[in-house]
Image (spheres, helix red, strand yellow):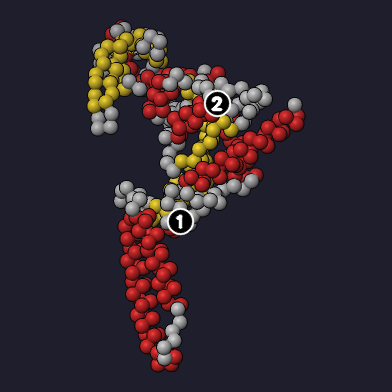
Amino acid sequence: MCRELGLISVGQINIDGTKIRANAANRRTRTREEYQKWLTSIDEKIRQILSEAEATDSKEDQVFKDKRGDELPRQIQDQQKLKDKIQQVMEKFKDEKEKINLTDPDARFMKDGRYRIDTNYNCQAVLSKEQFILASEVLTEPSDRKALSVMVEATDQNLGQPILEVAADAGYSSYDNYEYLDKNHKIGYIPDQNLRKGNAQDKPYHQDHFTYDSQKDIFLCPEGKLLNLYKIRREERSYRKFQVKIYKAKDCPACPKKSLCSRQKYRTITIEDRKALLLEMRKRLETEIGRNKYLQRLWTTEPFFGHLKYNLGYRHFFLRSLKKVKGEFRLMCIGYNLKKMHKMLAFS
Ligand code: SF4
């Protein structure tokens, strides 16, 4: 609708996420072992209630003959219900380290932006340049890395056409995501976690100062000399098969900087095949256009999450379970878009 009204021009999308508290108490998020201990304590409690009931019964029998109160059996019923609920939740565990909440078993312990760990959902949104939400999603996976492909695909589907450019913060950077964007012919503006750490700053001949040219598949060293592709080696790890590319310079023996650069006769650079994608991404982000495209993320996504959390005070869900929480978050996003549309149409 926004596109038909000329309110959005979709070329670049901006992805970001925030953690929103589930409608569940942290103390009810436990491991399988902790639930097992809880079950044992409930059994103990039931035994205690039964023995108290027996004692009360015999006292009451003496006083009231055949009459008896029903408070204690109700207590047992409550404990039995709690036991059933715990047993249901225990069937969901996949490993010993996993923690599941009893009240909302879909929510997970996640660290939020302030490094606080709570029982949360990971809420993702994709915004256009005009600050309209193009796609939203709620995930139970704390890491944003897994969200990138989900959000790009949701946006493509909502718009009925593939988007071209994607900006997101370093939380979304991974070789998998760089590869995903490359294979799907999308241009990313996603810095990697080490981009600004500057571990290579005091080493002028560090590998990071060699410039990669993806068109020619070559490197240029800091002295402007060429490193050609020399060898490709195939390697295999338990998680994936990959290839390692080795690039070799040929002008090193005559180079005045050789003692600072390499102990080998010819300097080589060894990179995993996907590192080329990372280098390309860094190169793109170093250009003025790349920097501006990346900055677009700041003034599109941050106002939305800021409005949601600080203006509306929407810091926790009202509903429980992933399905309902997804609906709740989508309604918040629709409301935001409608308000924005109203404002833009009123002033146009
Ligand atoms: S030693 Fe070789 S790779 Fe290093 S700066 Fe000199 S020419 Fe370039």
Inspect the image, locate mark 2, and give the three-letter code of the amino acid beneath it: Leu
Q: Position of residue 106 (x, y in %)?
A: 43, 48
Residue holding disc 1: 103
* Disc 1 Cβ-to-ligand 1 distance below 8 Å: no
Labels 1 and 2: the sequence-earlier one: 1
Q: Which residue is drawn at 41% across and 28% down?
A: 177
**Relative to 313, is 259 above or below?**
above
Quick one: SS at disc 2? Answer: helix
Nearest the viewer among 237 and 107 is 107
Hey, which quadrant is residue 90 in on the image? Answer: bottom left
Q: Residue at x 51, y 26 (%)?
A: 156
Nearest the viewer among 17 and 79 is 79
**Relative to 147, is 31 above or below?**
below
Residue holding disc 2: 159
Nearest the viewer among 285 and 81 is 81
Nearest the viewer among 64 and 2 is 64
Quarter of the figure with the N terminus:
top right
Regarding ligand 1, which quadrant of the image does it lie in?
top left
Outermost residue toward the right in this view: 347
Circle 1 or circle 2, nearest the eye: 2
Does residue 50 appear in this view?
yes
Q: Position of residue 146 (x, y in %)?
A: 42, 35
Outermost residue toward the front in this view: 66
Q: Which residue is drawn at 29% across and 17% down?
A: 245
Q: Where is residue 85 in the image (x, y as percent from the top left)?
A: 40, 59
Quarter of the figure with the C terminus:
top right
- Measured in 3D between alpha carbons, the distance from the residue under mark 1 to the one under mark 2, in whole angstroms, is 36 Å
